Image (cartoon, rainbow, N blue to C red):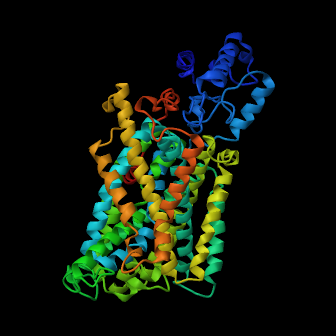
Amino acid sequence: MSKLSSFINRKAMFHRDKDTGVSSNDDSIGNNSTMKENNEVIELINTNSFKDSSDKPPITLRKSKLSEIGSLHSGSNLHQHGTTSLHDDEESDTEEAQYQDTRVKRALKQRHIGMIALGGTIGTGLFVGIATPLSNAGPVGSLIAYIFMGSVVYFVTQSLGEMATFIPVTSSITVFSKRFLSPAFGVANGYMYWFNWAITYAVEISVIGQVIQYWTKAVPLAAWIGIFWVIVTLMNFFPVKVYGEFEFWIASIKVLAIMGYLIYALIIVCGGSHQGPIGFRYWRNPGPWGPGIISDKTGEARFLGWVSSLINAAFTYQGTELVGITAGEAANPRKSVPRAINKVVFRIALFYIMSLFFIGLLVPFNDDRLANDSAVIASSPFVISIQNAGTRALPDIFNAVVLLTIISAANSNVYVGSRVLYALALTGNAPKIFSYVTKYGVPYMGVICTAALGLLAFLVVNNNANTAFNWLINISTLAGLCAWLFISLSHIRFMQALKYRGISRDDLPFKAKLMPWGAYYASFFVTVIIFIQGFQAFTPKFDVSTFFTSYISLILLAVLFSGCQLYYRCRFIWKVEDIDIDSDRREIEAIIWEEDEPKNLWEKFWAWVA
């Protein structure tokens, strides 16, 4: 093992193609010393170095110039994914072609990354999903629920940011679980995280048709679902740079729309409509606390209503962790990822908390439209508040913004799901076909597989729209909560590994705030919410359907973990001395990144927002 480490240390910093001698068309390939070293490392790995490659991912050597590196293939082995294998020219050509088929592109800039995170977060959860917590918990109860979940999300993203800037790999959320916890945890988390975004895609697509039906019902709902399913799926076959630009501009519209709504809401609250000054009118009548749910006892019902609001809040916040997914395709992850992470508090405060605060001032929790089972968009508190103010054209304009918002969110869902499957395939934990990419670096089979689950959106055609919508939300939310838990647990183990290796967190590219206590805080409360979120299945009597939709994701996670544990026959959790914090890190440190600083006021504004 020491011999292999010595070799890797000699080769880790190479980043010029003529120095590497790995191109099959380069005369330097015939250099005896180079050939000897490459054959030496292959022999070491094939024999004694890694007896159980599924347990301990080897450090791989790249064939392309590091300045043009695509994605860091964490955990891939030498012969599977086009890394160094130079026995002869013919094999080199084969391996090079294979490498080109399994490499995504580092083409996302800092402004893309920030807006992709916004694009995946600002969707139906914000514009439509807050109707249920408002009607159940009231304006104050729902506001407290969202502030509380916001604190949890803040620490989750801080944890992910510290790890993803140190080791920026594609689908880092799943990779870190495998490296810092165990292979079983990593694979189970990977498939659950993919399942989460595939189901969320179905949620978003199910609402698009209903948004259009706000204007006309001449076209059947199923037709709109099918049309936009095809459009969004095809959009994900464009190069990642095109995807990043699309998300940037659509997310920019979202940001401007929400900022505009907040200004509009402030004017209405202060008396800028036919209603006169509203102020805290609805906090007095019908009151700050909603009626609650299930129980006949007021206090108990309100508490249960508040708990149910936590679930809705968790769904709304899902997507804030997307910066960890994009790290593997970021052009300068050591700069762009920390900047995006540091703006999470700003986004939470402005886009979620402030929006919910004004919604609570403008819409009473007992408004019947909040519980509209026939049309999801008709229950949007944003649209209801505008209708109440009597502004004629604005509901249609805002509905158009909601349409663009949902398309953007659905686009992000497919992007994330495809990258998760891609990362699983690179580590040998998913069929190899999911690691193949187009010439533009798009993992096309991952796109197809993720989009296929989006067809569950057709469930809303044969059921009450809100009922099917809430089913899909429950399934997706629990899967997302499990991912948050694994992020926090992985970070705890990551910090322990740093301490064991004598590495100070002060020397990291990005140091998470209030750690390790923040990670413990997030881990504890996410675990509690995971187990109590299905309480409605048990009261007032046991309901099989509610139990299934509330806990199917947890059952699936248990089955996946047990199966992986039996397959890998590995430890339940890595020993701290066995945790790998070196793979893929050295390549990043060898690259000299070009700075992408804003050049004018417009770019500076979006750099501040995104």
| Residue appearing at x 48%, y 80% in the figure | 466
Q: Position of residue 217 (x, y in %)?
A: 58, 87
Residue situated in front as seen by the camera: 194 or 451: 194
Q: Position of residue 139 (x, y in %)?
A: 27, 76
Does 531 sit above or below residue 341? below
- Left or right, 135 with respect to 109, comes to left
| Residue appearing at x 73%, y 32% in the figure | 95
Q: Is residue 179 visible?
A: yes
- Left or right, 306 with respect to 414, comes to left
- Left or right, 57 with respect to 508, comes to right
Does 261 sit above or below residue 80? below
* Residue lying farthest to the right in this orientation: 90
| Residue appearing at x 36%, y 41% in the figure | 492
Picture quadrant where residue 598 is located: top left
Residue situated in front as seen by the camera: 571 or 342: 571
Quadrant for the N terminus in the image: top right
Does 313 sit above or below residue 14? below
Residue situated in front as seen by the camera: 362 or 467: 467
Residue situated in front as seen by the camera: 40 or 534: 534
Q: Position of residue 500 (x, y in %)?
A: 36, 28
| Residue appearing at x 65%, y 28% in the figure | 63
Give the mark count.
Answer: 0
Q: Is residue 111 visible?
A: no
Q: Position of residue 517 (x, y in %)?
A: 27, 45
